[in-house]
Amino acid sequence: MTESIPESGQLGPIACVTVTAPELAAVEACYTGFLDYRVVGRGRVDAALADHWQAPAVAGSRYLLLGPAAGTECILRFVETPTDPAYVPFSTYGWNAAEIMVRNVDGLAERLTDSPFEIIGAPQNLSFSDDIRAMQILGPGKELLYLTEFKRPIPGLDTPVARCDVDSTFIVILGGPSMQGLQNFYHENFGVPNAPVMESRVKGMSAAFGNSPEHKYPIAALPLHGQSLIEVDEMPAGATNRPVPDGSLPAGIAIVSVVSRLSGGTPVGGDEPPYAGAGGSICRTGPAGELLEIIYRG
């Protein structure tokens, strides 16, 4: 295996968010029926891909690929596996949420009121900008999604414009024990620029730790190429590593895949997204136990 480490500006955009879920039929019904996502692939995880993910036990598991109406540049991948009934997003280190760009968050909230998605945070302006409005929902795999509307462009924040009512993931949220440790890992290993730290509400974290919804936590938005970001959150005392069954994937959001414009890695996954057109891929474990997949398109 050849591994090329991306330089600054070479890592991104986000190409795929992988979630474990107990029943793919329920996932498909939720996303196609209420978020207008489309099925763009399905099958079973082969042994080579399972090994690539450091999760040989998921070989043979069914998977489902879903993408927004606007395209398949960034998709959601669900792997059907038993999930931890005790898992609560934002209670453990790792990938805690994915943020999806939407056109009208208040209208979407009305649509989701009687859906299988659990609304855990009603639409509200962000604590640091009235020009960004978001809500939070929990899906059938206990995946936490932020549905975010930008009322106007934010100076200094390079983000996409929603191409359809519910577009793709443009931010992934990573929690860990140390802000400096998270930033250092992505800067030193992948050339991702460090970002200023700000204080912000993180409602999912407050719910998990019994804090006030108005409590604020240190966060930073690490910029990736292609109008994507990794939000890194310093979690409070009491957060722990996410348990991972032997040879399997962690509960909730298990893997985040990002593109590199360099070349390298091992070919996996065939011609379906997110691997279509890629030369190879590697999978790395980060400081919060998160699985990061790099897909080389150089």
Image: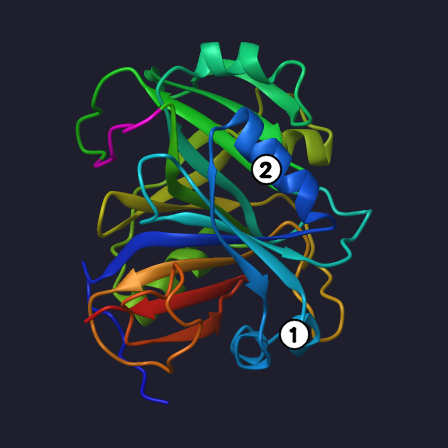
Q: Could you say which is closer to the camera, residue 132 or residue 268?
A: 268
The disc placed on residue 121 is none
* Furthest residue toward bottom: 1
What amino acid is labelled 1 in the image? Ala
Left or right: 33, with 129 as reference point: right
Residue 41 vs 120, above or below: the answer is: below
Instruction: Specify start and end residues of the magenta stretch as a single range.
Output: 158-164
Q: Could you say which is closer to the camera, residue 216 or residue 253?
A: 253
Q: Choose top left, top right, bottom left or bottom right for residue 57.
A: bottom right
Residue 244 vs 223, above or below: the answer is: below
- The image position of residue 108, as x and y in percent, is 49, 16
What kind of secondary structure does the magenta stretch mostly adopt? Answer: loop
Residue 202 vs 74, above or below: the answer is: above
The disc placed on residue 59 is 1
Give me the residue at 18% from left, 33% from top: 156
Q: How many other residues sit within 10 Å of disc 2, few (<14), some (14-19) or many (≥20)?
A: many
Left or right: 214, with 271 as reference point: right
Earlier sequence position, callout 2 versus callout 1: 1
The answer to whether any part of residue 141 appears in the image is no
- The image position of residue 10, as x and y in percent, is 20, 62
The residue indicated by pointer 2 is 144
Q: Could you say which is closer to the camera, residue 84 or residue 208?
A: 84
Q: How many other residues sit within 10 Å of disc 1, few (<14), some (14-19) or many (≥20)?
A: some
Proximity of marks 2 and 1: CB atoms separated by less than 8 Å: no
